[in-house]
Image (cartoon, coloured by chain):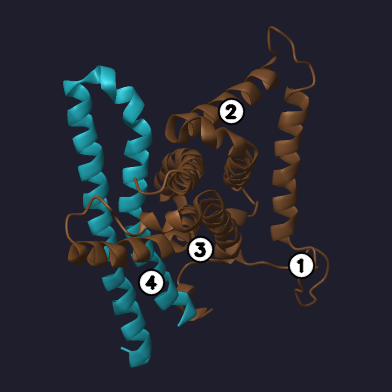
Amino acid sequence: MATEGGSRFNIHPMEQFEVHPLFGDGPVHWYTPTNATLWMALTVLAVSLLMLVGSRGRALVPSRMQSIAESIYGFVHKMITDITGKEGAKYFPYIITLFLFILFANLLALIPGSFASTSHIAVTALLALAVFITVTAIGFYKHGAHFLNLFWVKSAPTVALRCVLAVIEGISYFVRPLSHSVRLAGNMMAGHAVLKVFAGFAGALGFAAFVPILAITAVYGLELMVAVIQAYVFTILTVVYLNDALHPGH
Amino acid sequence: MEGNIADMGQFIGAGLACVGMGGAGIGVGLVAGNFLSGALRNPAAAGEQTATLFIGIAFAEALGIFSFLVALLLMFAV
């Protein structure tokens, strides 16, 4: 990273995304506990707590935790059955795991001083590649060679048009993991960088700092919304891709 | 005036790359505006289409995020 680009700010907006070891200053290996692994572990812990505490009572009149867990469960289940019908319900555990992990990672990243694990393309690319490979495998497993009807559009009138469409569909299929991962990481990174840039203004302005602080408050509210919407968008796109695999040929 | 010409090129390139985000803004505005005008004509059908709305916004927005990514790469990775 070039450091001279940000030397005019007293807070560097990109510094918050640096991965460093939790203990000492040694090199980062794949097994080193870093701030990234810490916050991803906390995310998993928060999701597990919500679901374990929420499903412990199983009361007819739900407690607060139980009703939160139930409404998230119902929300994701409705999303799947609306788009893919009954067939997609089999993949519900995977989809809700994705949704809850991304949602809680996004929300925990908004705690001041924490680390935004979903703003790293390494994390989101892994999630998106897993979705891409799973969905492609499901498509070929369920339909065999008929899955290629997704690219060879039968409803197009001429063969020439089908060839053109095959190229377009092929490109749009293989760019999916890229756009899927970059959308989430880019949104999170941009939001957190904006917060830090405004914080840099507040440090430089002295008494007039209340203007950027008000702006930070507003942007923080926006970021809260973006965190939830991006988790929703990532999940719903996964479901749409799954639907393409379950029902190819439109 | 000091600094070298490569830095200047980086900054100008990053600024130009951000122009692409305006296109994403136009796209998201078109999606949301058309959804709203459709929803006001037929409010009963609007509720079922919110998923489609978000998918459309996500596709329009992705290209803006790509240009933001290019700007970030120019600033910090090149």
Whether discs 2 and 3 lie on one chain: the answer is yes
Cα gap from disc 3 to disc 1, whole angstroms = 20 Å
Residue, disc 1: A21
- The x and y percentages for residue A149 are 37, 55
User: Is disc 1 placed on a helix, strand or loop?
Assistant: loop
Query: Disc 4 marks which residue?
Result: B70
**Marks 4 and 1 in Cβ contact (< 8 Å):** no
Q: Amino acid at mark 3?
A: Pro
Whether pointer 2 and pointer 4 mark residues with C-beta atoms closer than 8 Å, the reply is no
> Callout 3: residue from which chain?
A
Q: Which chain is cyan?
A: B
Query: Mark 2 belongs to which amino acid?
Result: Ile
Quadrant in the rendering for residue A32: bottom right
Tell me which amino acid carries mark 4: Val
Q: Quadrant of the C terminus of chain A?
A: top left
Foreground tag (3 vs 1) = 1
Q: Earlier in the sequence, mark 3 or mark 1?
A: 3
Work out which residue is located at the far right of the displayed protein and give it.
A23
Give the SS element for disc 2. Answer: helix
Dot 3 surroundings within 10 Å: few (below 14), some, or many (20 or more)? Answer: many
Give the residue type at disc 1. Answer: Pro
The Cα atoms of the two marked residues, 4 and 1, are separated by 28 Å
**Colour of the chain lettered A:** brown
Nearest-to-viewer mark from 3 and 4:
4
Q: Are marks 3 and 1 on the same chain?
A: yes
Q: Is residue A77 above or below residue A131?
A: above
| Contact flag, marks 3 and 1 (Cβ < 8 Å) | no
